[in-house]
């Protein structure tokens, strides 16, 4: 006999998607209560989420128009009170004394216990504590999913036959942790998994209701029963004498063939399973009684249009015979295809802002794309409107969360970027007045931390400060003010005082209990957060993110019992993983009529204007995540649902949200420069509208919104930026340049103006890795030392000697893996080639000078002009002539460029050499100019001998230089930026200052925001 036939008939209702769910529900309950404000408290209403409970409460307030009411007892389905269940069972036959439901284990405690079990297996599954914690998080998800579906792990071993791939065998061995060890661990804790605890409560509540049916009404509304235990409770409530179930948007209009063809990805599939579980047919589900004053938000034709667009794939042949659509289906419906997510966010912000122009009108953005939600919230700030993403903000990205992470980054790495990030963080104060620490940090950055990394830790920073204040430092960066030096050292001392104990604990490498690391971590964070007159603990924990961080640390401290000791680096990695799952939600200061919601939070919500955004395939609906544990057949055999069920739930959210009065569907055509595919639902909607001859109708307003967004930041008048043409007075113009700067002067006069007149120089990168320039300097240094040491006769083993000199020139850089792997082998090839050249060359040509400086003075209208040079090498020929050599680790200029005057370095050096301008080099004829390319590739080196007469080249170079001097000694001559594009340098530090892209022919263009 069918059990359903012996039980009371089920009381199941539905509310159409175009009806405001909570308002209609509240009005119906009010009618059932006979309009008695004191009778409502006899009702018990169960809803899917806490947000739905709040919405129903607000619906009653709207219904009563401010009159006092005794509201029904309302609770989320998942939060049924276990103590209440126990009281209900107390006194029921066979259940005297109530129920003893074990509590749920705390999520952090569970993650740490699982991580401990994973780490106990050694390096087999995880090599670090952080990896173990990540795997533990995934194991916890599997536990929750398995227990939610009421599946068991007893079938796990049979899922992986011996002939399966080896990695499945490894997976099975890993999952044995939750099969063999986890039940014992849980029993020792006296707890159960959260999903199992929820199942226990819901099933116990259902059993209690069956054993002792309540005499007062109980209504479960808005749930699709996707959780089996919830479906069991709904089935029980539906057959209670006083029970009712109200379904969200059950489609009773589709034909039986379509209903029978529903699959996991269809929005009605979950409801079909639920009513089958309850034991009712669609035609037995009634409409929820509508009270007066509750009107549909949109025409029924729109609901029919969406249902038609989402019909099962197996029945879409019906579109061939699709008749005319009711024009009212498109009323209030707009689709907008934005170019980029930034444009999409801006348009959505405009739509929400416009909604506020109507008194009392509400609006909401619904999207699973959290990045898009944050963009919209940011765009709304231009009108001083504050909204918050209902999903919250990751704790790790809040000010306090990022501060706690930076504390550990600094303690573990001691590198410039973590140090500066911490010192510039708004929570850091070091006991000074607000702002002083950040000012000192900026000074430390420019004086010490830009360029190569100093020695590790705060002692390395101290040493770097003292060195930069000494005479040995580069004059361009030397700290000449003792006060600045003392202030920087005082800042380092304060930082050391706050973090010294934590940094020392990390440095000693000893393993400590997790609770000890938390104490050190929190202590350092509070000490560094202090301001003058305000304790760090008062600043750190007082705001929403501080409260959330404090709760997280308390929970972690409670969960840490029994976790094995760990080192500082492992603690930092573990903290990164554990804090990642926490969120912070704002509760105050948000706009009361605007909302930004995720899919779960938007369920049962109704707003006057709804924007469904991020409608791209893979975002909405989301792409089913890859299962790290099981293949599709294994999931099916194990009792887990197909990944497409997630798509079906998202489709139901989409279909019900389409019931708003004014509806916008938005998407971005490109995300991060990559073309996107419209959501399958938009493509289906396009197809249906196309068949009905209405294609393009809902996109008609898209141009209006795109134009409005673009006009927001469009200036009233665009004034093209002219190319810069500064004309400083002659007295301010440079009277001294090097031979390499002469080439810059010719190719890009503005760069000389910026460097010599404005005295601007590019800042080195922070924590700079050695680049091509440093590699060239090192090779130059090694060759210079070798030639200086052996100017006449080479040593017995010249290659070994040059390699040894090279090691000294590279110094500590050889400790860097990239330098050792790439630079050093190239230098060895260069050394071998260089020694071979020297051995042959020195039979006739002898080195005369290396790295030698020289100068020559030339007359000009504005006074003497000094040309300086530093020759890489000058050799003496047997006839007494000179050969000038320029080492190039990059590509040397071509002979044509030298002949045309585009690369005047060597000809100008020849001019200086012929005039005796180089130190310790007597005047002599220049017989040759050579470029030695030292690439370390194949070949390792080559010699490019300029065939033109050096004397003629020098004369032409002098003539060209004197012309330049005369031109720029004219006060009317401007320092143009790259006046001849064909001569433009390959790289300049001043392109952004000259704003080249704004006025040059190839400039302009817009980048995606």
Image (cartoon, rainbow, N blue to C red):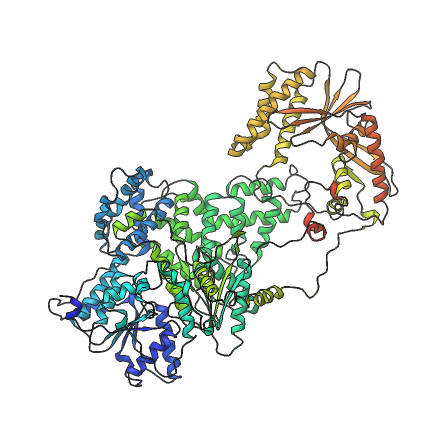
Residue 260 to residue 771: above or below: below
Q: Is residue 953 visible to the viewer in this orientation of the structure?
A: yes
Instruction: Say which of 600 and 568 sits in front.
Output: 600
Instruction: Say which of 863 and 762 sits in front.
Output: 762
Residue 888 picture location, percent across and down: 67, 30
Residue 410 to residue 584: above or below: above
Residue 318 picture location, percent across and down: 38, 63
The image quadrant that residue 291 belongs to is: bottom left
Which residue is farthest right?
861
User: Would residue 903 be found to the left or right of residue 502 on screen?
Assistant: right
The image quadrant that residue 868 belongs to is: top right
Give me the residue at 18% from left, 62% from top.
100
Instruction: Say which of 67 and 148 sits in front.
Output: 148
Give me the residue at 67% from left, 32% from top.
891
User: Would residue 379 be found to the left or right of residue 719 on screen?
Assistant: left
Which residue is farthest left?
94
Residue 977 picture location, percent across and down: 75, 47
Quadrant holding the N terminus: bottom left
Q: What number of labels is visible?
A: 0
Quadrant holding the C terminus: bottom right
User: Would residue 269 be found to the left or right of residue 465 on screen?
Assistant: left
Q: Is residue 543 visible to the viewer in this orientation of the structure?
A: no
Residue 892 picture location, percent across and down: 69, 31
Which residue is farthest front?
321
């Amino acid at each position: 006999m069918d059990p359903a036939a012996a039980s009371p008939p089920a009381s199941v209702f539905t509310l159409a998607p175009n009806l405001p769910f909570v308002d209609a529900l509240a009005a119906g309950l009010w009618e059932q209560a006979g309009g008695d404000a004191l009778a409502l408290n006899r009702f018990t209403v169960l809803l899917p989420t806490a947000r739905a409970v709040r919405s129903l409460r607000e619906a009653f307030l709207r219904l009563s128009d401010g009159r006092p009411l005794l509201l029904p007892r309302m609770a989320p389905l998942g939060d049924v009170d276990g103590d209440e269940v126990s009281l209900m069972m107390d006194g029921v036959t066979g259940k005297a004394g109530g129920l003893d439901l074990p509590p749920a284990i705390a999520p952090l405690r569970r993650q740490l216990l699982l991580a401990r079990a994973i780490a106990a297996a050694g390096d087999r599954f995880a090599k670090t504590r952080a990896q173990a914690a990540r795997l533990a998080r995934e194991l916890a998800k599997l536990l929750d999913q398995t227990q939610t579906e009421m599946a068991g792990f007893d079938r796990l071993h049979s899922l992986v036959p011996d002939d399966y791939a080896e990695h499945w065998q490894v997976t099975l061995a890993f999952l044995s942790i939750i099969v063999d060890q986890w039940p014992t661990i849980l029993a020792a804790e006296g707890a159960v998994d959260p999903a199992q605890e929820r199942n226990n409560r819901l099933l116990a509540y259902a059993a209690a209701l069956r054993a002792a049916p309540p005499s007062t009404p109980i209504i479960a509304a808005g749930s699709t029963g996707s959780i089996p235990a919830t479906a069991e409770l709904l089935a029980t409530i539906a057959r209670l004498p006083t029970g009712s179930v109200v379904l969200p948007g059950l489609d009773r209009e589709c034909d039986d063939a379509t209903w029978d063809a529903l699959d996991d990805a269809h929005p009605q599939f979950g409801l079909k399973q639920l009513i089958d579980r309850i034991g009712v047919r669609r035609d037995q589900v009634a409409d929820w009684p509508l009270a007066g004053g509750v009107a549909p938000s949109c025409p029924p034709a729109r609901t029919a249009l969406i249902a038609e667009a989402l019909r099962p794939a197996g029945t879409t042949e019906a579109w061939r015979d699709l008749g005319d659509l009711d024009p009212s289906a498109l009323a209030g419906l707009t689709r907008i295809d934005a170019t980029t997510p930034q444009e999409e966010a801006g348009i959505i912000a405009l739509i929400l802002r416009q909604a506020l122009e109507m008194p009392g009108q509400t609006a909401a953005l619904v999207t699973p794309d959290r990045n898009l939600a944050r963009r919209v919230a940011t765009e709304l700030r231009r009108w001083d409107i504050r909204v918050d993403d209902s999903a919250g903000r990751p704790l790790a990205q809040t000010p306090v969360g990022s501060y706690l992470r930076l504390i550990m980054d600094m303690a573990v790495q001691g590198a410039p970027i973590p140090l500066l990030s911490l010192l510039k963080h708004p929570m850091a104060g070091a006991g000074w007045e607000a702002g002083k620490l950040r000012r000192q940090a900026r000074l430390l950055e420019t004086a010490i931390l830009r360029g190569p990394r100093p020695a590790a830790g705060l002692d390395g920073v101290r040493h770097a400060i003292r060195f930069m204040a000494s005479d040995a430092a580069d004059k361009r960066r030397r700290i000449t003010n003792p006060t600045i030096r003392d202030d920087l050292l005082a800042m380092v001392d304060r930082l050391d005082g706050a973090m010294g104990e934590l940094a020392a604990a990390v440095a000693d490498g000893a393993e400590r209990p997790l609770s000890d690391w938390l104490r050190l971590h929190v202590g350092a964070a509070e000490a560094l957060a202090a301001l003058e007159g305000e304790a760090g603990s008062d600043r750190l924990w007082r705001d929403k993110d501080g409260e959330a961080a404090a709760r997280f640390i308390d929970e972690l401290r409670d969960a840490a019992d029994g976790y094995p000791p760990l080192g500082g680096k492992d603690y930092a990695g573990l903290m990164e993983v554990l804090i990642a799952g926490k969120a912070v939600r704002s509760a105050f200061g948000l706009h009361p009529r605007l909302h930004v919601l995720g899919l779960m939070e938007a369920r049962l919500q109704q707003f006057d204007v709804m924007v469904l955004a991020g409608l791209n395939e893979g975002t909405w609906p989301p792409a089913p995540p890859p299962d790290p544990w099981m293949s599709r057949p294994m999931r099916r055999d194990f009792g887990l649902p197909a990944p497409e069920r997630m798509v079906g739930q998202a489709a139901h959210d989409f279909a019900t949200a389409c019931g708003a009065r004014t509806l916008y569907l938005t998407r971005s055509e490109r995300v991060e420069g990559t073309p996107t595919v419209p959501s399958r639902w938009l493509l289906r909607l396009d197809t249906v509208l196309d068949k009905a001859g209405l294609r393009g109708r809902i996109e008609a307003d898209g141009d209006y919104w795109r134009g409005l967004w673009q006009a927001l930041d469009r200036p009233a008048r665009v004034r093209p930026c002219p190319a810069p043409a500064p004309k400083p007075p002659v007295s301010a113009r440079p009277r001294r340049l090097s031979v390499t700067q002469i080439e810059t002067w010719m190719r890009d006069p503005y760069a000389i103006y910026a460097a010599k007149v404005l005295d601007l120089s590019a800042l080195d990168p922070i924590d700079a890795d050695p680049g091509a320039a440093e590699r060239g300097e090192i090779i130059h240094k090694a060759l210079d030392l070798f030639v200086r040491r052996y100017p006449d006769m080479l040593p017995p083993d010249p290659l070994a000697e040059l390699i040894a000199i090279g090691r000294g020139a590279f110094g500590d850089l050889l400790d860097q893996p990239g330098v050792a792997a790439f630079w050093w082998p190239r230098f060895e090839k260069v050394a071998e080639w260089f020694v071979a050249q020297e051995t042959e060359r020195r039979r006739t040509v002898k080195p005369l000078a290396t790295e030698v400086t020289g100068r020559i003075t030339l007359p000009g209208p504005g006074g003497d002009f000094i040309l300086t040079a530093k020759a890489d090498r000058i050799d003496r020929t047997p006839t007494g002539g000179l050969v000038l050599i320029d080492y190039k680790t990059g590509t040397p200029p071509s002979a044509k460029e030298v002949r045309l005057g585009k690369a005047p370095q060597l000809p100008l050096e020849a001019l200086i050499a012929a005039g005796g301008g180089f130190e310790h080099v007597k005047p002599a004829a220049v017989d040759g100019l050579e470029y030695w390319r030292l690439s370390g590739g194949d070949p390792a080196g080559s010699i490019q001998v300029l065939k033109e007469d050096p004397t003629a080249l020098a004369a032409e170079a002098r003539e060209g230089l004197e012309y330049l001097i005369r031109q720029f000694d004219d006060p009317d001559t401007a320092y143009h930026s790259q006046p001849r594009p064909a001569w433009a340098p390959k790289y300049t530090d001043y392109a952004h200052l000259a704003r080249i892209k704004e006025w040059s022919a190839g400039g302009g263009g817009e980048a995606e925001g």
